[in-house]
Amino acid sequence: MYKETTLKKKITVFSIFALIPLFVFTAVVIVPFIIGFIMTLTNWNGTSSVFQFIGFNNYKAAFSDNQFWVSLWLTIRYVFFTLILTNIVAFFLALLVTAGRKGQHFFRAGFFTPNLVGGIILGFVWQFIFARVLVYFGKTWGLDIFTYSWLGDTTKAFWALVIVGVWQNAGYMMLIYIAGLMSIPSSLSEAANLDGAGSFQQLFRIKIPMMISSFTICLFLTLQRSFMVYDTNLSLTKGGPYRSTEIIAMHVYDDAFIYRNFGSGQAKAIMLFIIVSLIVTLQVRVMKRLEVDA
């Protein structure tokens, strides 16, 4: 495949195809990460020109911050529910728009549209729906669950955040599941039909096992998006009421930029990076093993 035989030619090819992407990746990912780690070892407040190295005191402060663990546990709950609900809804939508029904291309575009809307705008739209539209219909039709705004309730505000997260991401994951469904050879379904297999048998014995790679990608993306959500959290609930919906990304941002604790804020970001990396690595390894078995 590679025809370059001399070191000079190899360096030339590397420079043409990989040098610029490598430079950009180093400049926007590696260098900021190293600077951020060094920042965690200082007491810099973000504005002062003078700072001191204080070792791992910022990590000790992060571990002893009760609100950090509250936000982290809230984030894990948020990720758990959005991960499951987003992929169930997305897979169901993918089955629906690949069933050969009339107008399925229109519905594909419609289901994908929420993903094109920015998180800030999306949050404000749903804030209006939860605070005004649902309350109006709840009072008009006597539906007690909608007679007040969910965003003012410490329990229901969390579920409002989950609903918006699922609504935003399901369309994007649907496209990946559609690609997985379309890649299954039609001969398998034809053979299953000849053998008398029903729709559910074909779904659980043919389609799902053949789509493990699609599940791997969708679960990975949902995990990454759910752990990193900030814009929707900001515009929909702003962490309220009483910090009951303060997702970990917002907690880290507020600690660093609102309270000017850059060291501890960055230390929490590093801890979050390690946690997310471990979870995502475990998820990919498990799913890859299932993919081989399938």
Image (tube, rainbow, N blue to C red):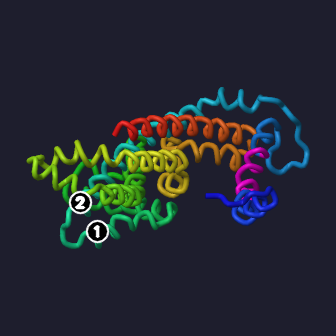
| Residue 174 place in picture, x, y as percent | 35, 58
Name the residue tied to disc 2.
96
Q: Which mark is residue 247?
A: none
Mark 1, Cα crowd under 10 Å, few <14 / some 14-19 / many 20+, is: some
Secondary structure mostly taken by the magenta-highlighted segment of the chain: helix
Query: Residue 194 lies in magenta, yes or no?
Result: no
Instruction: Give the amino acid type for the residue marked by disc 2 in the picture.
Output: Leu
Evaluate whether residue 14 shows in this view.
yes
Q: Is 111 situated above or below 199?
A: below
Is 118 on the left or on the right of 3, as rendered? Answer: left
Confirm or deny contact between disc 2 and disc 1 (CB under 8 A): yes
Evaluate whether residue 130 shows in this view.
no
Residue at 46%, 59% in the rendered image: 123
| Residue 133 place in picture, x, y as percent | 32, 63
Residue at 82%, 38% in the rendered image: 43
Helix, strand, or loop for circle 1? helix
Q: Is 267 situated above or below 207?
A: above
Which image quadrant: the C terminus?
Answer: top left
Which residue is farthest right?
A: 50
Is 152 on the left or on the right of 31, as rendered? Answer: left
Which image quadrant: the N terminus?
Answer: bottom right
Residue at 22%, 52% in the rendered image: 188
| Residue 246 place in picture, x, y as percent | 53, 44
* Residue toward you, 245 or 135: 245
Residue at 29%, 55% in the rendered image: 184
Q: How many marks?
A: 2
Mark 2, Cα crowd under 10 Å, few <14 / some 14-19 / many 20+, is: some
- Choose the circle earlier in sequence order: 2 or 1: 2
Name the residue tied to disc 1.
107
* Residue toward you, 133 or 216: 216
Q: Give the range drawn in magenta.
A: 23-35
Instruction: Give the amino acid type for the residue marked by disc 1 in the picture.
Output: Phe
